[in-house]
Image (spheres, rainbow, N blue to C red):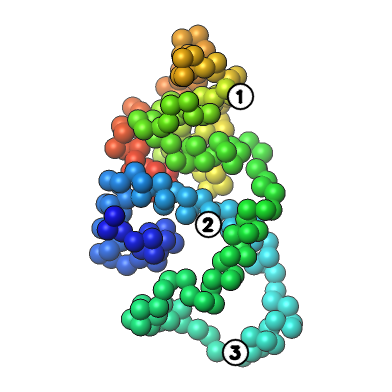
């Protein structure tokens, strides 16, 4: 692929300048593998932000403040620093950032995940983030039935699984489950539709949708944009 991992990370973080930002966006929309990688990066970023938001809101301890130079320490222009680093060919994740990032990743993996009430758990959220109707793996624990936009513009996805079926819509917190039903019984590697909970979910999706279901290309583009 012509988009490097470093460029994809910068694109996900909103740190890629034009015209490269538009070029990367077009390549992501056309490449499902790139779109999946971008979705994983954004999901990890959201998880880390949720874990460390309470800590970031606290004042810097006195000892650490003194170590960093106190309140009169020099203010760093991060934009200029980033441009200087790029000009010298330094990697995006330098030796200073590396240990902190590794520690953050370890905490993100081992700390218990708290799912807000009414929202999809991490496993379901991952399926809603990544799976496309046209290319999802047969026999996956959760099947995405269709994607659409409801009145107000939010993206919503109808899903069916052995445990439960429902409709989840993406907001600033995550995938909020707005309709639910029982599990769908698998049949010959797929899911039975007629008379099943999935059929009821599809009917509710028709009532919620502001227009037709997304096409395969529209789904891929929406995924690349983080369903926003």
Could you tell me how far apart the alpha carbons at marks 2 and 1 are, in whole angstroms? 28 Å
Please identify, in this view, whether the residue under mark 2 or under mark 3 is nearer the observer.
2
Q: Residue furthest top?
A: 195
Instruction: From the top left corner, tell me how far across and down residue 150 is, in percent.
Output: 43, 33
Residue that mark 1 sits on: 163
Please, is residue 223 above or below residue 111 in the view?
A: above
Residue located 34% across and 61% down the image = 4
Say whether disc 2 or disc 3 marks the residue closer to the N-terminus. Answer: 2
Residue located 55% across and 89% down the image = 74
Discs 3, 1 touching: Cβ within 8 Å: no
The N terminus lies in quadrant = bottom left
Q: In this view, does 75 lie to the left or right of 91?
A: right
Say whether disc 3 or disc 1 marks the residue closer to the N-terminus. Answer: 3
Instruction: From the top left corner, tell me how far across and down residue 179 is, in percent.
Output: 56, 26
Instruction: From the top left corner, tell me how far across and down residue 148 is, in percent.
Output: 40, 32
Residue that mark 2 sits on: 45
Q: Residues within 10 Å of mark 1 (few under 14, many from 20)?
A: few
Please, is residue 154 above or below residue 9 in the view?
A: above
Residue toward you, 71 or 67: 67
Q: How crowded is mark 3: few (under 14 residues within 10 Å), some or many (20 or more)?
A: few
| Element type at mark 3 | loop
Instruction: From the top left corner, tell me how far across and down residue 227 is, in percent.
Output: 42, 44
Residue that mark 3 sits on: 73
Q: Is residue 77 visible?
A: yes
Residue located 43% across and 36% down the image = 131
Residue toward you, 60 or 6: 6
């Amino acid at each position: 692929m012509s988009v490097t991992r470093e460029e994809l990370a910068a694109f996900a973080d909103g740190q890629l300048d034009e015209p490269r930002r538009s070029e990367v966006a077009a390549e992501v929309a056309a490449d499902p593998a790139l779109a999946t990688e971008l979705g994983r990066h954004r999901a990890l970023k959201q998880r880390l932000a949720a874990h460390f938001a309470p800590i970031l809101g606290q004042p810097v301890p006195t000892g650490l403040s003194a170590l960093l130079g106190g309140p009169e320490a020099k203010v760093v222009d991060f934009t200029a620093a980033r441009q200087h680093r790029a000009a010298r060919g330094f990697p995006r994740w330098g030796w200073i950032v590396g240990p902190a990032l590794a520690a953050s990743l370890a905490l993100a993996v081992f700390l218990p995940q708290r799912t807000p009430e009414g929202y999809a758990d991490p496993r379901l959220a991952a399926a809603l983030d990544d799976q496309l109707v046209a290319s999802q793996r047969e026999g996956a624990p959760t099947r995405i039935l269709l994607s659409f936009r409801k009145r107000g513009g939010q993206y919503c996805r109808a899903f069916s699984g052995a445990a439960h079926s429902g409709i989840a819509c993406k907001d600033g917190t995550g995938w909020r489950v707005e309709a639910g039903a029982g599990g769908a019984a698998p049949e010959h590697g797929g899911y039975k539709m007629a008379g099943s909970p999935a059929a009821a979910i599809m009917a509710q999706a028709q009532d919620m949708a502001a227009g037709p279901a997304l096409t395969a290309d529209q789904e891929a583009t929406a995924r690349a944009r983080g369903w926003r």
